[in-house]
């Protein structure tokens, strides 16, 4: 018998943000390996009695995949619990390849990624009509090199929403690259640490010129999302371009326009 290894996105921290599918798999798991440095162990609260639960924080990649393969020989359902979504900075393929080589079936369950959780915590939108309709999920070059064409300065030329993972120690670089791309010193920046973690979340707002100092003052040096976006703070704008979907002059599949464009303007 060989069971399936499910790579389950645990979400950003709050166990309530796990998907129902993830929770149901946990409830039937024979063994769970969670990434303890980032995933809250609380997500394993639905594991059945007798389920083996282990933390991978001290394991190498080989140890992780050996563990998953050996458990798949013993249980029908084995879970690798990952932070946020498994497909974002989650070493997913590095783990799947050895499982493929060992003929162990795999499946992936998506999770709420920390960029979305951070924006939700701050009551911000990722897209806004006529302001930005595009989101870039990226990181800034540190020890991991960025592929050609993906430097922050190049990406920032789009002036859209940019969510930066794994980059909280690189706020100086972020400022330099965004300035190079034409963003102003006054551009709003949002930093959320431990988004959705009950009692631990910190939200810091600032501008490109002062966000680094503000984060230092709050002692934020890890587990934080940085968002640069022309849509930040829109909740308090007096004038908004509204979404066409709810516009009375806009006809779509489920609703006929009740007023014409001209009536709307007058
Ligand atoms: N797969 C994860 C990302 C893993 S990389 C996801 O989809 O969210 C780890 C980085 O994710 C951290 O450096 C931080 O930038 C971000 N991160 C993870 N959890 C977070 C949280 N609860 N709040 C803010 N940022 C978080």
Image: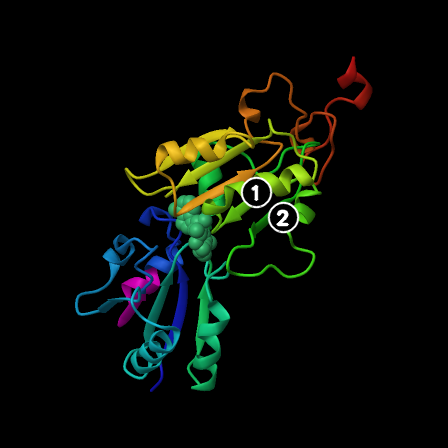
Which residue is at the front of the view, 81 or 190? Answer: 190
Q: x%, y% of residue 198?
A: 29, 40
Q: Where, quadrant-wise, is the C terminus in this rendering?
A: top right
Query: In the drawing, does residue 229 fall left or right of residue 54?
Result: right
Q: x%, y% of residue 138?
A: 57, 51
Q: x%, y% of residue 152?
A: 63, 48
Q: Is residue 243 magenta?
A: no
Q: Residues within 10 Å of mark 1 (few under 14, many from 20)?
A: many
Q: Residues within 10 Å of mark 2 (few under 14, many from 20)?
A: many
Residue 147 sits in which quadrant? bottom right
Image colouring: rainbow
Cβ at disc 2 under 8 Å from ligand 1? no
The span shown in magenta is 24-33
Residue at numbered disc 2: 152
Is any part of residue 112 visible from this angle? Answer: no
Q: Mark 2 or mark 1: which comes first in sequence?
A: 2
């Amino acid at each position: 018998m060989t069971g399936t290894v499910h790579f389950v996105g645990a979400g950003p921290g709050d166990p309530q943000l796990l998907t129902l599918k993830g929770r149901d798999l946990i409830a039937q798991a024979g063994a769970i390996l969670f990434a303890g440095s980032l995933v809250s162990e609380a997500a394993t609260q639905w594991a059945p009695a007798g389920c083996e639960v282990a933390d991978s924080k001290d394991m190498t990649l080989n140890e992780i995949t050996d563990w998953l393969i050996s458990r798949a020989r013993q249980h029908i359902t084995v879970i690798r619990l990952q932070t946020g979504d498994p497909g974002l900075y989650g070493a997913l393929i590095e783990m799947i390849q050895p499982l493929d080589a060992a003929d162990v079936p795999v499946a992936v369950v998506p999770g709420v990624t920390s960029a979305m959780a951070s924006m939700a915590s701050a009551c911000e939108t990722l897209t806004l009509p006529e302001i930005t309709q595009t989101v870039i999920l990226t990181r800034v070059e540190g020890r991991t090199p960025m592929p050609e064409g993906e430097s922050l300065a190049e990406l920032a030329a789009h002036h859209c929403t940019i969510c930066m993972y794994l980059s909280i120690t690189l706020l100086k670089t972020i400022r330099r690259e965004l300035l190079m791309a034409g963003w102003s010193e006054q551009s709003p920046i949002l930093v959320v640490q431990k988004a959705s973690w009950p009692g631990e979340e910190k939200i810091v707002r600032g501008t490109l010129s002062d966000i680094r100092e503000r984060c230092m003052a709050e002692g934020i040096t890890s587990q934080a999302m940085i968002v640069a976006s022309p849509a930040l703070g829109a909740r308090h704008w007096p004038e908004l371009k509204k979404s066409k979907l709810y516009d009375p002059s806009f006809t779509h599949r489920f609703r006929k326009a009740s007023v014409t464009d001209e009536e709307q303007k007058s």
